[in-house]
Image: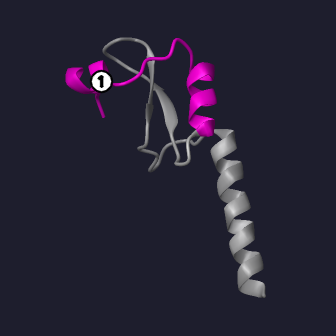
Protein backbone atom coordinates (compact mmCIF):
# COMPACT_ATOMS: atom_id res chain seq x y z
CA UNK A 1 0.00 0.00 0.00
CA UNK A 2 1.29 3.41 -0.89
CA UNK A 3 1.36 6.26 1.62
CA UNK A 4 -0.68 9.25 0.54
CA UNK A 5 1.04 12.68 0.69
CA UNK A 6 -1.27 13.97 3.44
CA UNK A 7 -0.55 10.95 5.62
CA UNK A 8 3.20 11.21 5.01
CA UNK A 9 3.21 14.86 6.10
CA UNK A 10 1.43 14.06 9.38
CA UNK A 11 3.59 11.10 10.35
CA UNK A 12 6.77 11.38 12.37
CA UNK A 13 9.89 10.79 10.31
CA UNK A 14 12.88 8.78 11.43
CA UNK A 15 16.30 8.91 9.82
CA UNK A 16 16.91 5.18 10.31
CA UNK A 17 15.00 1.97 10.90
CA UNK A 18 16.89 1.44 14.18
CA UNK A 19 15.64 4.77 15.53
CA UNK A 20 12.06 3.89 14.55
CA UNK A 21 12.37 0.45 16.18
CA UNK A 22 13.46 2.02 19.48
CA UNK A 23 10.28 4.13 19.49
CA UNK A 24 8.09 1.19 18.37
CA UNK A 25 9.43 -0.99 21.19
CA UNK A 26 8.14 1.46 23.81
CA UNK A 27 4.64 1.64 22.32
CA UNK A 28 1.87 -0.32 24.10
CA UNK A 29 0.59 -1.62 20.74
CA UNK A 30 2.33 -3.28 17.77
CA UNK A 31 4.09 -0.99 15.35
CA UNK A 32 6.50 -1.72 12.55
CA UNK A 33 8.76 0.58 10.54
CA UNK A 34 8.63 1.04 6.79
CA UNK A 35 10.50 3.16 4.26
CA UNK A 36 8.18 5.77 2.73
CA UNK A 37 8.15 5.89 -1.07
CA UNK A 38 7.34 9.62 -1.02
CA UNK A 39 9.86 11.15 1.38
CA UNK A 40 12.41 8.34 1.64
CA UNK A 41 12.41 8.47 5.45
CA UNK A 42 11.14 5.79 7.83
CA UNK A 43 7.64 5.97 9.34
CA UNK A 44 5.81 3.67 11.76
CA UNK A 45 2.58 1.87 10.97
CA UNK A 46 0.14 -0.20 12.96
CA UNK A 47 -0.64 -2.38 9.95
CA UNK A 48 1.05 -5.67 10.67
CA UNK A 49 -1.21 -8.24 8.97
CA UNK A 50 0.96 -10.46 6.79
CA UNK A 51 4.05 -8.37 7.52
CA UNK A 52 7.27 -9.39 9.22
CA UNK A 53 7.20 -8.17 12.82
CA UNK A 54 10.21 -6.81 14.72
CA UNK A 55 11.92 -9.31 17.03
CA UNK A 56 10.76 -7.51 20.20
CA UNK A 57 7.11 -7.77 19.07
CA UNK A 58 7.43 -11.50 18.42
CA UNK A 59 8.92 -11.95 21.91
CA UNK A 60 6.15 -9.80 23.43
CA UNK A 61 3.44 -11.92 21.80
CA UNK A 62 5.10 -15.19 22.85
CA UNK A 63 5.31 -14.00 26.46
CA UNK A 64 1.64 -12.98 26.46
CA UNK A 65 0.67 -16.34 24.99
CA UNK A 66 2.67 -18.17 27.67
CA UNK A 67 0.90 -16.19 30.41
CA UNK A 68 -2.50 -17.09 28.93
CA UNK A 69 -1.54 -20.76 28.87
CA UNK A 70 -0.45 -20.65 32.51
CA UNK A 71 -3.69 -18.96 33.51
CA UNK A 72 -5.74 -21.56 31.61
CA UNK A 73 -3.83 -24.41 33.27
CA UNK A 74 -4.74 -23.19 36.76
Q: Provide residue 5's location: percent of width, then percent of height.
A: 22, 20
- 57 vs 39, left or right, is right
Q: Provide residue 54's location: percent of width, then percent of height.
A: 62, 38
Residue drawn where x is 41% and y is 44% of the image: 47
Splitting the image into 4 quarters, where does residue 46 fall? Answer: top left
Report helix, strand or loop for mark 1: helix
Q: Which residue is mark 1?
A: 10
From this view, report whether residue 33 is shown above or below residue 19.
below
Q: Is residue 4 visible?
A: no
Closest to the observer, 38 or 67: 67
Q: Is residue 5 visible?
A: yes
Would residue 21 be counted in the magenta stretch? yes
From this view, report whether residue 28 is shown above or below residue 42.
below
Q: Provide residue 69's location: percent of width, then percent of height.
A: 73, 76
Closest to the observer, 2 or 26: 26
Which segment is the magenta one?
A: 1-26
Quarter in which the C terminus is drawn: bottom right
Q: Provide residue 14's location: percent of width, then percent of height.
A: 50, 17
Residue drawn where x is 53% and y is 46% of the image: 30
Splitting the image into 4 quarters, where does residue 21 fall? Answer: top right
Closest to the observer, 50 or 7: 7
Splitting the image into 4 quarters, where does residue 64 fall? Answer: bottom right
From this view, report whether residue 24 is shown above or below residue 37.
below
Amino acid sequence: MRTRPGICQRKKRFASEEEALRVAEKAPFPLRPYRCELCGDVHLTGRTKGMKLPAFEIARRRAAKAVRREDAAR
